[in-house]
Structure formats: C-alpha cells, structure tokens
Image (tube, rainbow, N blue to C red):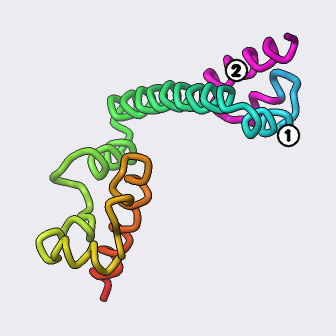
Amino acid sequence: MKKDRVQTKFLDTLREIPIVEIACKRTGISRNSVYRWRKEDDHFSYLMNKALEEGEGALNDLAESQLLSLIKEKHFQSIRFWLTNRHSKFKKPDPAIEQKDNFDPDEVIENLGLTSEDFLDENRDATAKRIRKYLIEMHDK
C-alpha cells in the first residue's frame, strides 16, 4: 500500500509540474521505478498520461496568460508571436494547406498504400502525419 501512496503523490506532483524528472525528485522515487510501473501497470500508465495532460494544460494556460500580459505591456516580440501564430492575416502559409486543391485524394491514398485500417481512430494521428509529410514532399518537388 506504500506503493499506492507514493504513486498518488507522484501523480499529484506531475499534475503540478508535468516533467517526470522533477516529479520523481520531489517525491523521492527513481525514474526507473516510474517507467517500470508505467510498463507493467496499464492503469498507472493511463493515470500518468492523464496527469501529464492535465499538467501540460495548466502550464499552457499559465504561459498563455504570461504572453497576454506581455502583449498588454506592448512587448513587440510577444505581439509578433501572437499575430503570426493566431491571426489569419499574419500567419505564415502552410505549404501543405496551400496545395490542398492541387492533389487528388485517391492518388495520395494509393501512393501511400493506405488502407481502411489507417483511418481507424487509433491510427488517425499517424496517418495524418504520413499524409502531411507526403503533401509537403510533393510541394517541394
């Protein structure tokens, strides 16, 4: 049961600071133990992924809040960063998106050898990356 308390403390720390190394140091456990638990225990692995996700979300909110504060203080680099990443008028064009009308989806599927398996939820991200890479390569030719 001590293991359960240590794991709970680790996961709580990970929610605050989503960096495994730091969470390990703060809870006094080794990274090897954490990664062993993650490998051997699907439930712990799920909880760890959720804790990382929650911690990253909170950190992202904090970073965005700080960025907005800098924008209010007229910090030029922060203003430029916001506009080039969030405002359609200032965004840099994505070559894959610019080429969207210049390719045949059936040709992409055929050239990549994609099957219905590639479009299942669990494979969707990997398939999207493959398609994006293919479109960028086609754009560069």
- Asked whether 82 or 61 is in front, the reply is 61
Q: Is residue 19 magenta?
A: yes
Q: Residue at x 70, y 20 (%)?
A: 13
Picture quarter with the C terminus: bottom left
Residue wearing tag 1: 32
Q: Residue at x 32, y 60 (%)?
A: 116
Q: Residue at x 84, y 17 (%)?
A: 3
* Range covered by the magenta-colored residues: 1-24
Q: Secondary structure at mark 2?
A: helix
Picture quarter with the N terminus: top right
State whether residue 44 appears in this view. Answer: yes
Residue wearing tag 2: 13
Give, as a three-letter code, the residue at label 2. Answer: Thr
Q: Secondary structure at mark 1?
A: helix
Q: Is residue 85 magenta?
A: no
Give, as a three-letter code, the residue at label 1. Answer: Asn
Residue farthest to the front, as pictured: 116
Q: Where is 115 relative to 65, above or below?
A: below
- Asked whether 139 or 87 is in front, the reply is 139
Tell me the crowding category of disc 2: few under 14, some 14 to 19, or many 20 or more residues within 10 angstroms, Cα based: many
Q: Residue 33: give x, y in percent of width and height.
A: 85, 34
Q: Residue 136: give x, y in percent of width and height.
A: 33, 74
